[in-house]
Amino acid sequence: MYLKMHLLSRRAYSGLLFSQGSMATCLRRGKSLIKPRLCRNISLSCQRYTVMTSWIIERYGRNDVLRFTNNMMFPVIHFPNEVIIKVHAASLNPIDVNMRNGYGAAALNMKRDPLKLKSTGNEFPLTLGRDVSGVIMECGLNVSYFKPGDEVWAAIPPWKQGTISEFVVASGNEISHKPKCLSHMEAASLPYVGLTAWSAMNQIGGLNQDNCSGKRILIFGASGGVGTFAIQLMKAWGGHVTAVCSQDASTLVKKLGADDVIDYKSGDVAEQLKMLPLFDFILDNVGGPTEKWSPDFLKKWSGATYVTLVTPFLLNVDRLGVADGMLQTGVTIGTKTVKHLCKGIHYRWAFFTPSGQSLDEIAKLVESGKW
């Protein structure tokens, strides 16, 4: 479940509306800049506003580290491909809860400051929240497919400031036009889980609308955010989906299109799966012991693929440091890949990948009624 939040304060909205002249500072699709004298390197909005409201943390810990502030620094466009979004709705994901506890801090700080030029703790104050749906307020000079006033949705990478705030900065290649059939509240529940599932099934797993028809897909953790999206995606592409979840969620996953449902609480899952034909693809949102036995239910030597979203990368870096953690991770994935390849199946890890282009494809599915 994902906590969808409307940000309460809208006081800065009217002050950030642009005139027709200032809108010309953004590049448009098929148009060139007519008034070069309006181009500036300094964000116009930041000359007028310096702070905004936001939910932040200033140290890692439990819920008591969360703090609401009216004095969060207003976001600034640092690169010409960035935009500032007025947040209308945002949502939290499990990764945000883990980040609050400090999960992945070492790897994420390496991404934020690869040369280690800043002092320890420079990520604070840190805003959580990955999903956003809102309206573009300002564009960088190289942004060509969006303009102020466009309704957009996006999933912001975890190494950037999050979305539980009045405004957020995103790269132009991370955003997409929001489906018109969705409200901001509805749209803010989808990008992160949708892109995670898309990464696992399409980019890593190699499935698409042209090769998925008739393939047997097994999804562990099918009633979660990623799982429910994956069910709908596979059904839209013509796959046969077997969903593993609790009995309480069986009605939901069947409604979403699952052909078979396995209740992991009613008995041994492996024994129940033995009653079904083998699979072409497995998506594992659970990990742990499941990874040890579930690949046995794939069709051997047929190109079948096992993809898991539960990986030790961030934990390894947190525990061992950047160099040793990455080395340990490389050894682990290499060993498992060779081990499974010798058994006639492909073994892969998948991660969330921010992509406006993929969100465009997801938006088409939404608007066609397939999600």
Image: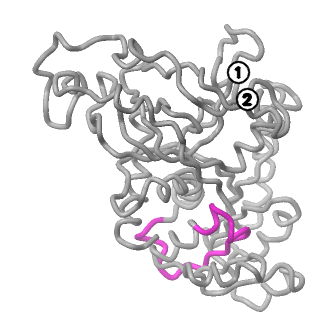
Q: Earlier in the sequence, mark 2 or mark 1?
A: 2
Q: Is residue 164 above or below residue 310?
A: above
The residue pinned by badge 1 equals 124
Image spot of residue 100 (x, y percent): 77, 37
**What segment carries the magenta color?**
208-228
Q: Residues within 10 Å of mark 2 (few under 14, many from 20)?
A: many
**Element under disc 1:** loop
Residue type beneath disc 2: Ile
Few, some or many residues within 10 Å of mark 1 (<14, 14–19, 20+): few
Left or right: 333 as drawn, with respect to 267: left
Examine the structure image and report whether residue 345 is included in the region drawn in magenta: no
Mark 2 or mark 1: which is in front?
A: 2
The residue at the point 56 percent across, 78 percent down is 256
Query: Viewer-proximal residue, 335 or 84?
Result: 84
**Residue 270 quadrant:** bottom right
Task: Classify residue 193 by image quadrant.
Answer: bottom right
Q: Name the spot of residue 109 as percent of width and height, x first.
A: 70, 24
- Quadrant into which the N terminus falls: bottom right
Q: Is residue 177 left or right of residue 328?
A: left
Residue 57: assigned label: 2
